[in-house]
Amino acid sequence: MITPLQYQNLGGEILSDITFPSYSKPIVTKDSYSKGYVQRYFVQKINDLTITEVNKDKYNDIYSQYYNKVIIKWIISGPKNNVYKNKILETKGVQEQNNQTLVENEKKMKGIKSYLNNPLEFWGGK
C-alpha cells in the first residue's frame, strides 16, 4: 500500500481536504408545504454514474472539479395532475412539474430521472 506522502511525491493530489458525499434526505416542514416546494441537492462523481442526495452544507463543501452538482426545486404542494378549464391549462400539476424538472436536469446529471423515480415524493395533496 502506498502512503499519502508517497502518493503526493508521485504527483498525486492530497485528498485530506476533499469532502465526500453522504446521503441526506430533505427535511419537509409545514413551511415547505406552504411555500410549495423544497430544494434538493444532488452530486454525482464525474467518472461514475452514482448519484447521492446531500444536504445544502455538504453540497457547498463538495468540489465541482470532481462532481457534477445540481439543485432541484421539487414541487410538493398543489394538484396532483394538470388542471384544465375549457381545455386550457389552468394549473400545472405537481407530477407534471417534477417530471419536467427531471427531464431538464437529466441533461446535466445523467440518471437523475431514474434516481428520482417518484415525481409525487413528498407531495402533500391539494
Image (spheres, helix red, strand yellow):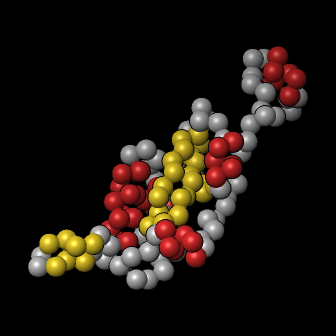
From the top left corner, tell me how far across and down residue 62 is, in percent. Answer: 66, 41
Determine whether, in the image, residue 76 is placed left or right of residue 93.
right
Q: Residue at x 74, y 37 (%)?
A: 18
- In which quarter of the view is residue 114 placed? bottom left
Q: Residue at x 60, y 73 (%)?
A: 29
Question: What count of labels does the image hold?
Answer: 0
- In which quarter of the view is residue 101 placed? bottom left
Viewer-proximal residue among 120 and 33: 33
From the top left corner, tell me how far across and down residue 64 is, in percent. Answer: 59, 36
Q: Residue furthest left?
A: 86
From the top left corner, tell me how far across and down residue 81 is, in percent. Answer: 31, 77
Q: Residue at x 44, y 67 (%)?
A: 75
Does the rendering let one see residue 104? yes
Q: Residue at x 37, y 71 (%)?
A: 94
Vertical comparison of 109 with 98: above or below: above
Determine whether, in the image, residue 51 is placed left or right of residue 36.
right
- In which quarter of the view is residue 119 placed? bottom left
Determine whether, in the image, residue 30 is placed left or right of residue 112.
right
Does the rendering let one see residue 117? no
Specify the quadrant that holds the C terminus.
bottom left
Q: Residue furthest bottom?
A: 126
From the top left corner, tell me how far across and down residue 1 is, in percent. Answer: 86, 33
Vertical comparison of 124 with 114: above or below: below
